[in-house]
Image (spheres, rainbow, N blue to C red):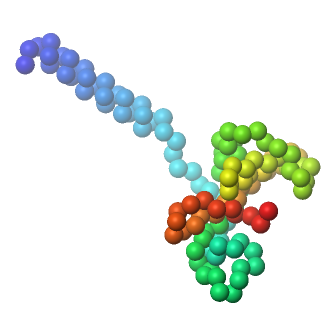
Amino acid sequence: MAPWDRKLASRSVIFVLLLLVVTIASGDEYKDLKGSYSIGGKSFYDPPVYEPKNTHIYFYLNGEAAKDLFDHMKIKAKSNVYSEDLLWKKIRNMQCTKSKRTSEYNCSFGIDIKNQTIVNGVAC
């Protein structure tokens, strides 16, 4: 290998390693969650007696996780019809609220365990 080929090869390796370090360093780390969850059936409230009670997992997030999700929903927040204090965002079956008064955030959604799809996590 010619000397200039070795220099080019070593520079390429160094560049790739630096790129990997920057990529790894810039990625967000996992954060703790605040909230709760529930295992249930397809019907969120008042399920029929014959319905299996272990097909879905429902999540209720609050705190930083809910704020991050609210902020990353790239739609305009709307006033909530049930409370003048709440701003509301909903994309399909995932919804989040923000209190105008307290700046408290909450998000709700569920997952159909078998089909691995997001489902509604609240009654309305």
The residue lying toward the viewer, choosing from 33 and 57, is 57
Can you say whether 29 is above or below 123 in the image?
A: above
Can you say whether 8 is above or below 106 in the image?
A: above
Outermost residue to the top: 4
Instruction: Give left or right: position of 3 versus 75.
Output: left
Can you say whether 58 is above or below 16 in the image?
A: below
Locate residue 22: give its quadrant.
Answer: top left
**Tag count in the figure?**
0
Residue at x 86% of width, y 50% of height: 80
Outermost residue to the left: 1
Residue 65 in percent (x, y) is at 65, 51
Locate residue 35: give its quadrant.
Answer: bottom right
Residue at x 31% of width, y 28% of height: 16
Is residue 56 at least partly visible in the picture? Answer: yes
Image quadrant where one finds the C terminus: bottom right
Is residue 67 at least partly visible in the picture? Answer: no
Instruction: Give left or right: position of 99 versus 34.
Output: right
Locate residue 108: give its quadrant.
Answer: bottom right
Residue 38 in percent (x, y) is at 65, 71
Residue 76 in percent (x, y) is at 76, 39
Image quadrant where one finds the N terminus: top left
